[in-house]
Image: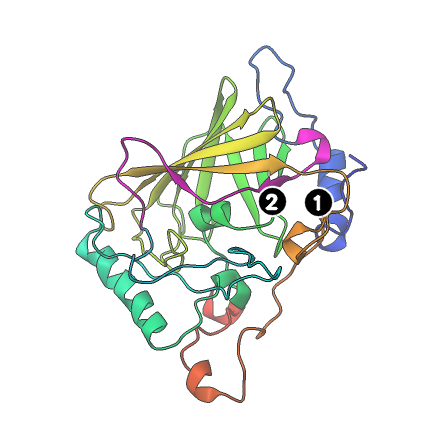
Amino acid sequence: MSKLNTALLAGGVFTALLCAGVASAASDANNIPDLMAGGNGWNSAGGMTSVPGSPPPVAQDPRFKFVGNNTNRRPDGGYDQPTWRYADLNNPNLTQFAKDGLKKANDLYNAGFALYARTSRCWQPGVVVLNLSPGRTYFIQTPKEVDIIWQRDQIVRHVYLNVPHTQNPKPSWNGESVGHYEGDTLVVDTIGQTTKSFVDAFRTPHSEQLHVIERYRLIEDGKALQVEMTIEDPMAFVQPWKITKRWAKDTTQPQGGDVTGTYNEEIRCMDGEMVNPLNQVYANKLEPLPTASRADF
């Protein structure tokens, strides 16, 4: 447990929880996976991958080249200028509701709006986008609950084990998650996510009917973690669709490079960092910062 940086969460809450938590049951007869990984985190490794046979997720419009951060390295050692997501509205699995929402995001792109991840404006992303986000993910496993903790912004998901969903849960950023183990796989079922969140980095909208099932399992002899997500929402998608996401086990040593590659650091949203207050034309295009008075949390 001492490998965890006590600064990972404000006030050392994360470390305290790990020290107090019940040890992982990875060695029991049911082969429950040790997602706690001896106190190590799981570092985001790549984006989402479509599952064969599934309808495809929303993809980049081929007319607009997407360049991610620190990709497309040039011979001089630098990187190409990053660009923004622009959804291909020709995806046959999208309903008109979803296309209308994506068009709003594309129109923001056309108007010159910088489509940073919403976490850069201090908004929580929702379950699917949280899994697709950069940075590290940590797990705390107890007999009754699994906590999934994102390294940034102190976002914590609570997965209650071996219990049914409540009736009509109040919508929230992470929804209501219940789970159980199926052999070496943690299965998480989530409903009740607020419609203020999106389903992906393209800002695909969803309704209150959004239903997400995640299946977490260790791969590559425990050196990597994979989640298979099934996303269902009849308001947004013609059929449910599946993707996988992979994480690599974090090391115990500091890593160089950009801020995403550093070790177990605490990263928090800085209020207002993505807006120039002197440029009101641009500022007016931005979503407001979330506030408790508007029940954004």
Residue that extends furthest to the top in the rendered view of this protein: 29
Query: In the rendered view, does 219 fall on the left or right side of 230?
Result: right
Residue 294 seen anywhere in this rendered image of the structure: yes
Let me know if residue 53 is in the magenta part: yes
Q: Residue 13, relative to residue 188: is it above or below?
A: below
Q: Quadrant of residue 31?
A: top right
Front position in the image: 239 or 82: 82
Residue name at image x 33 percent, y 66 percent: 105
SS assignment at label 2: strand
Instruction: Give, as a single range, the part of the protein colored magenta.
Output: 37-58
- 10 Å neighbourhood of mark 2: few (<14), some, or many (≥20)? many
Q: Is residue 6 left or right of residue 97?
A: right
In the picture, the quarter occupied by the N terminus is top right
Measured from the top left, where is residue 296 in percent x and y? Answer: 47, 64
Q: Residue at x 49, y 45 (%)?
A: 131
The answer to whether residue 297 is seen in the rendering is: no
Number of residues whose C-alpha sits closer than 10 Å to that of mark 1, classed few (under 14), some (14–19) or many (20 or more): many
Q: Are marks 2 and 1 in contact (CB under 8 Å)?
A: yes
Q: Position of residue 241 (x, y in %)?
A: 30, 39
- Label ID, residue 14: 1
Q: Amino acid at mark 2?
A: Ile
Is residue 232 one of those drawn in magenta?
no
* Element carrying mark 1: helix
Residue 201 x/y as whole percent: 41, 55
Q: Position of residue 224 (x, y in %)?
A: 58, 31
Residue at horizontal 38 percent and vertical 56 percent from the top: 198
Q: Nearer the viewer, residue 222 or 13?
A: 222
Amino acid type indicated by mark 1: Phe
Residue that mark 2 sits on: 149
